[in-house]
Image: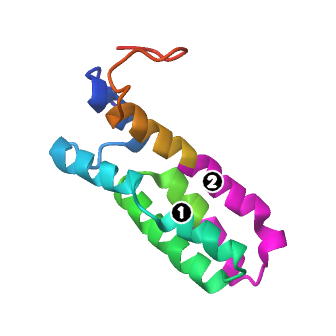
Amino acid sequence: MLIKSSGKKFLFTVWFGERYDDDEDVYEEKLRLFANDQEYDSIVAALHNWDYVIAERFSQRLKIKSYNLGMVRLAKRCNTLCLAKMSGKGAPDFTEEINDVTTVYGMMKDCIERAFGEEAGKPVKHRLNH
């Protein structure tokens, strides 16, 4: 993977790959939309309501968005959650799967916040600055 050294581009390349290499503005717009989506919250709410069909539906949506943005790790975790539901597992049985989705989703949201939030461009403790 080629690592570019200019601010946002470096962050995108490291975390999300090269999917929007020719149009960073479109990529940035899609990432900002992703940061405000409701799929993850809907998955959690559905699981709290024991509605596994809705949880799977929103997990599928999050998986598709993740793949489209190059967030393959998150997409794979969402797919694992979908497969767990399809195999007949219930909430106590797929705690590990939802925890994996939660962890990776949190990392992606944090990365987007670092790229576009109020602190964007400022040095972050314990992070390489280029």
Residue 1 visible here: no
Front position in the image: 51 or 71: 51
Mark 2 crowd level (few <14, some 14–19, many ≥20, 10 Å Cα): some
Identify residue for label 1.
40
Q: Quadrant of the N terminus?
A: top left
Is 124 magenta? The answer is no
Kind of element beneath mark 1: helix
Q: Earlier in the sequence, mark 1 or mark 2?
A: 1
Looking at the image, the residue that sits furthest to the right is 92
Front position in the image: 74 or 17: 74
Q: In the rendered view, does 58 fall on the left or right side of 26?
A: right
Residue at x 32% of width, y 56% of height: 33
Magenta span: chief secondary structure: helix
In the depicted structure, whether residue 29 falls above or below residue 112: below
Residue at x 47% of width, y 17% of height: 124
Identify residue for label 2.
102
Residue at x 71% of width, y 72% of height: 48
Quadrant location of residue 107? top right
Where does the image place residue 82, in percent across and percent down from the top left? 62, 74
